[in-house]
Image: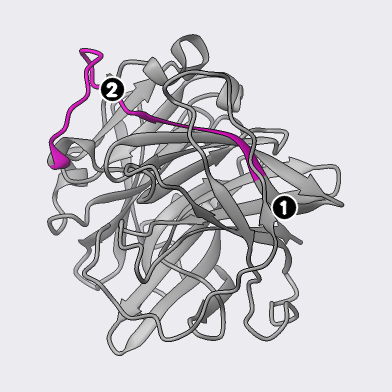
Amino acid sequence: MKHSRWVIGCCLSVAMLVPVPHASADNTAISVSTNLRSFARFGNGNLPSGLTFLGGLTLTSDNKDFGGFSGLEVSRDGKRFISVSDRGHWLTGGFVYEDGRLKGISHPRLAPILNRKGRIDGRDSHSDAEAVAAWSSKGLEGKMIVGFERRERVERFNIAKHGLKAKAKHVKSPKALSQGQRNGELEALGRFTEGPLKGWLIAISERNHAKDDSLRGWLWRKGKTREFHIPRHEDYLVTGLAILPGGKEIITVERSFQRPVLVGMALRRFSVEDLQKRNTGPGKLLFSGKLTSYQIDNMEGIAAHEDERGTIITVISDDNFNKSVQSTVMFQFRLH
């Protein structure tokens, strides 16, 4: 979701520049520079015991369409990622690791998200992509689904077959997705590819409130819909979700912004048993912190994958194309 400009009253960390190789010669390859970025402003030990920081990056590019990244999905092996922007673009690339820590990205590509006719839809109301997730257990090797906010809808793209030129295909979703505040409806999206809810889709709104101010969410499959409500953590709003490997839990990334307090990020964990209740309960809080204690930005996208040591969480920020005071940021954490 877009916000008016805010003043960030601290300097962001800039370390060594990591070179990023170009992709093969095509019109989607772009140049992106990455700077290492710490998470906590005063060392990296200020995390709860359930998380270990695995590296952070600030991403910059001269491409005018680079920015606004609101959704994120990572390949099953953790080597590649795909993101979507609220101005209707795909961003893809690979991760560069050193000794198990995130050090850069490789082969970045940027391309417009095409509509059902295979054309670019330049209308802001039609191109506001806020979430992306894998459709099947193939992950990035299969089809992807994208959630759009201002003209609320879910669409599927056969990325595996057609790459970033894939056409949109409509995915039926609950009508209630359109009942929230303007520019505050569909914000987080996923599809369970394993576990007790295999085959079910899940979506959570940003400002579609229930009467008790909790956030409305939905599970749906083949015409069946279950609504659930997530109690708010302090002043935070859900901006993304990731289904954990095994399909038995999700993690939400949540964003706080209320003047004069600066932007904040929270991570919460919910079981599928929680999600099948009308009121999920508060879930398990994994992290909650704000600028200036942490070098976060407007964190909106989240993804999860596994390695030989367990689950890794990746988050990305939406800079709202407000590059004078905001940044495109990526962080990775190990979940214990």
Image quarter in which the N terminus is found: bottom left
The disc placed on residue 114 is: 2
Magenta residues (range): 105-124
Residue 122 is one of the magenta-drawn residues: yes
Residue shown at 53% from the left, 18% from the top: 25
Residue 24 lies, in percent from the top left, at: 58, 20
Residue 319 lies, in percent from the top left, at: 37, 59
Image quarter in which the C terminus is found: bottom right
The disc placed on residue 200 is: none
Specify few, some or many for label 2: CA neighbours under 10 Å numbering under 14, 14-19, or 20 or more.
many
Specify few, some or many for label 1: CA neighbours under 10 Å numbering under 14, 14-19, or 20 or more.
many
The correct choice, above or below, for 181 with respect to 81 in the image is: below
In the depicted view, which residue is nearer to us: 71 or 201? 71
Using residue 60 as the reference point, say whether residue 81 is left or right of it. Answer: right
Using residue 195 as the reference point, say whether residue 222 is left or right of it. Answer: left
In this figure, which colouring scheme has been used for the structure? one colour
Residue 4 lies, in percent from the top left, at: 21, 69
Pointer 1 residue: 103
Using residue 20 as the reference point, say whether residue 184 is left or right of it. Answer: left
